[in-house]
Amino acid sequence: MIRKTRQFRFRDPDTSELRKLASKVASPEDFRVRHGRLLNLFGVKMVPGILNTLVQFYDIVCHCFTFLDFQLVPTLEEYSHLIGIPISDKEPFNGLEPEPKPAAIAAALHLETAIIKANLTPQKGLTTKFLYQQAFIHEEMGSYDVFYNILALLIYGLILFPDVGGLVDKNAIKIFLSRNPVPTLLADTYHSIHDRTLKGQGTILCCTPLLYKWFISHLPENFEANPENTRWSQKIMSLTPSDIAWFVPACSTEAIIDSCGGFGNVPLIGIRGGISYNPILARRQFGYPMEKPHHLAIDPVFYINQPDSADVRGMFVAAWRAIHKKTKEQLGRRSGLVRESYIQWVIERAAKFGMPYPLQRSPSTSTVSSSLPITFETREEFMDQLTKAQFESATWKRKYQTSECEKDTIMGILEQTSWQLQEKERENAELKDLLRRKDAIIDRMPGSRRRRREFFAGAISDSDE
């Protein structure tokens, strides 16, 4: 079953001035220590079409991206690694906090309170014009504390949490002051994609470079290179589980956030509402054994900030006062094993859910499973051999897929040529029919035949001449 694709757009704010400002950072390492790897977001060169294709795979039931026989789940820990900012144990942004005080903003930016108070808008935001002016002034003065903090706030307002044009709004300021942006970043990603998917169209408001960076981190090397100009839907539908870079060692953590409060999963609070996500579906991405989720918290909890959603938002806020983490001891030894029960569950889920594009391959039924009592040393040797075999298999699969792509490209050219010839034949037929009808109309006109005979009778042949 192929389900209907949807028309989405992504907010693409003008960041040319911000890039110019970022290029003036004298010490990127100093900036990273203060504000994480935010500058890396400027280096993300997004290939048009990849994200638009990805969001077509969003699973509104499991709150993840479900492909033919595997799933990918953006996680708090991965987002935290990508921007280099740890997840705080304190409550994240919920939108119910008091309005940011001018004194608090001034202290965070190392500016005078009077200047902030004079430039706060009625919406309790700061205009980008004011912030740019202050940033350039203090950069020229060599006041890097001020310059770096203002630059970071601009990144929060224009890239991490894009909203009102020309303004870093109060929500972005609140999150900047909290120094805990990761839960809100992930929440906005899920919430906006979910909301737009339900509506069937619209603009997705989230940190687009971060979502793109996360997705590419799991794809094969050089996936973005597309010399054959193959459709992205075709390339993504061709991916197999062995093509995916599941575990990124740099993202390794001692524990992962598994649930909060009385929820069986993690309730996320974004700027515009709340939604939950299921870390149990991301075990494979953390390098732990992947099994069929017997206790998957599939719930319809999704809300948009409105007066009638106050109770649900309150439940989400309260849940973050009791964060439940799972450690390595609870998750099992890292092995990369994937049970057949999980693979089959995903295949059935994908079949029921439907794919947004035509199949490019059959779902894989091969699994990595081990129920034999293998000793630690033998297991390690087994995993080494298995990794080599999987690598060789993936290499041959990629060669096969490249050949298939080339064949599809040639077939596409032939189909296009055939269509063009058919169009020419149709145009010629229409022209001939038009001429016949024109002659018929002329023949029906009084005296037309006699005038035609006289015309041709008066013609002089080449021999007469």
Image (cartoon, rainbow, N blue to C red):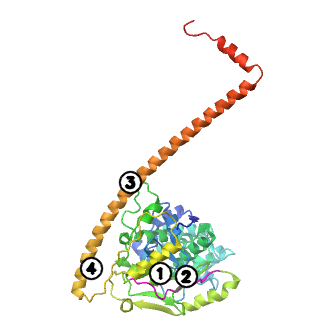
Q: Which residue is mark 3?
A: 406
Q: Is residue 417 covered in magenta?
A: no
**Is label 2 or label 1 in front?**
1
Tag 2: Cα neighbours inside 10 Å, few (<14), some, or many (≥20)? some
**Residue 135 point in image, percent of width and height:** 53, 69
270 vs 72, left or right, is right
Q: Where 184 falls versus 24 (above or below)?
A: below
Please tell me the numbered disc located at residue 212: none
Tell me which residue sits at (45%, 75%) in the image.
347
Q: Amino acid at mark 4?
A: Met
Q: Which residue is mark 1?
A: 76
**Is label 1 or label 3 in front?**
3
Q: Where 332 falls versus 451 (above or below)?
A: below
Please tell me in which quadrant of the rendered image residue 452 appears: top right
Q: Which residue is mark 4?
A: 383
Rounded to the nearest angstrom, the CA distance separating label 2 from label 1 is: 19 Å
Rounded to the nearest angstrom, the CA distance separating label 4 from label 1 is: 28 Å
* Label total for image: 4
**Residue 162 point in image, percent of width and height:** 58, 70
Which structural element holds mark 2?
A: helix
Q: Quadrant of the C terminus?
A: top right
In front here: 185 or 325? 325
Tag 4: Cα neighbours inside 10 Å, few (<14), some, or many (≥20)? some
**Is label 3 or label 2 in front?**
3
Circle nearer the N terminus (2, 1): 1
Q: Most extreme residue toward the top, as rendered?
A: 464
Q: Amino acid at mark 2?
A: Leu
Circle nearer the N terminus (1, 3): 1
Q: Where 94 falls versus 142 (above or below)?
A: below
